[in-house]
Structures are given as structure tokens and as C-alpha cells.
Image (cartoon, grey):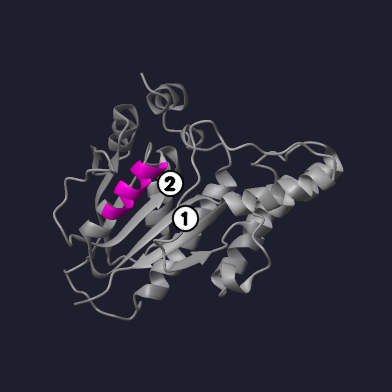
Amino acid sequence: MNHWDERAKEHKSAPSASWADVQAMGIEAHAIGVHARRHVSNDYSYGDDKLQWLDVGCANGYLTRKIKEQLPLFFNLRECVDLSPGMVGLALDRGLPAFVEDMRALDQPDNSYDLITCVRALQNIDIPGQNQAIAEMKRVLKPGGQLIVVGESAAGRHRLNFLRGKAGMESLPLAPFNYPEPRCWAQREVAHMDYYFMMTRLIYPMTYTSLPSFDSHFSEKCATIQRELNQSEHDAKDALPMVGCQTMKIYTKETA
């Protein structure tokens, strides 16, 4: 049984199956919704011809459901995939169209999806595998479609740990099953979590010597402020140097 099947067995349908920080997961879902809506006009009428969406690395489906709540109704979740049979079973229990599939060799035909999301899944495979997965997601993306990948920011983690070190705190290590992500493939990189990480991983521990509970009023308020920032044009290129441990990378496939 691999790591993610073990987590599926232990955590079942709880959000902690993929991450204990439920507030951060809400920020991720909201930020994806913001950028998907910006890419496609909300007043455009699609009738029965909905935009097709693929979620790659869906885990137990908790975050997929959260993302779906943030997307306009004209997005149709055609499939969500994960390499862990245990996770896929839990996603199926949520009523999601989930399948066991390797992102490095997707079964879907070329030019199939208008939106592809991949949240904290690409970072779980090594760099050659990540490059394969990116190529596969680009392949099945329709011309004009959008690929949104949320994952590890090595630069942001380094800066956050530098500040924690100055405050006498230990570094926050990269999980042993995670790898930094390549940046060159994306056209845009968005700092969607910096304020939240600054407050919960730096400011709060400086005061109370521990991380806050992620279901606390403090964490909830920080997440609310971060969502408000993300609603505005708060891209990495316009922000202060990134101090969050993850960023959102966005790629739009050229039309013919």
C-alpha cells in the first residue's frame, strides 16, 4: 500500500487526507475559481454546450468539490483522476466521476478539456515525471483552454524559512515525498497564499510559539483576508517577494 492509499485508509473522506490545513484548501479553491472566471466571460451563453473540466490528482474529492462550488455553472466536471485507488474510491463515494489514472500518461484524447486543474499533485512526483505530466496535461487541453497548477514554491519556502530563522524558529521542511516544481512551462505565476502563510507560519508562531489551529478564528480570518486579496489582481510579479510555500501557475494553450 503506497503513502496515499494509507492516507485514504486513515483519513477517509476528511480534508486531512490530502492536507491538514483546511483554510488553505479553501483559499486554493477560491483562487482557482477567480482565475477561471477571469478567463471565461460569465455573461457568455453556452446553452447545453458546457465547458469541460478535468481535475488531475483529485485525492478523495474534497477539494474537487470545493473547486466545483467556486466555478460558474457552465463548467462541467467530466472526469477527475488520481493514481491512488483508495483515494479514487472515496471520490466515487462523493458522487464524482473519478478514475484511477497516472497523470504522466493520461487516457484522454488530444484537445479534450477547456479547464484542467492540478492542486498539490504534481509536486508528488519527481522532476522528469513532472515534465511528462505537464506535457500530457497540455496535450489534452483544448486550444484556448486554461491549465491551473497549484504547488510547491521553492523560492517562497526559502524566503519564509529565512524569516523564521531570523525570528529563532526552525525551518519548515519540504515533505519527504514532495519535489520542487519547474517554472518555465507556465505563462503566469500567481502568489495566492503569501499573506496567509506569513500570518500563520510566521507572525502567529512568533507570538504563541506554535502554529495556529487551522479551524481557529485566527486562521479563518487570515484566510478571509487572503481570499479578498486574491479577488484583486494580486499576481506574483506585482507583489512583494514570495513568502508562501506554494504558488499558482497558469498556462493558456494557443489557438490555431
| x then y, percent, for residue 140 | 21, 57
Which SS class for mark 1?
helix
Q: Which residue is mark 2?
A: 63
Q: Residues within 10 Å of mark 1 (few under 14, many from 20)?
A: many
Q: Is residue 100 magenta?
A: no
State the extent of the magenta-drawn residues as a range: 127-135
Figure quadrant of the C terminus = bottom left
Measure the C-alpha gap from mark 2 to mark 1.
7 Å
**Horizontal arrangement in the rendering, residue 197 relative to residue 94 (left or right):** right
* SS type, badge 2: helix
Tell me the chief SS of the magenta region: helix
Task: Identify the residue position indicated by label 1 in the image.
Answer: 29
Name the quadrant containing residue 99: top left
* Residue at screen point 46% across, 22% down: 10
* Image location (x, y in percent) of residue 103: 29, 44
**Dot 2 and dot 1 residues touching (CB under 8 Å):** yes
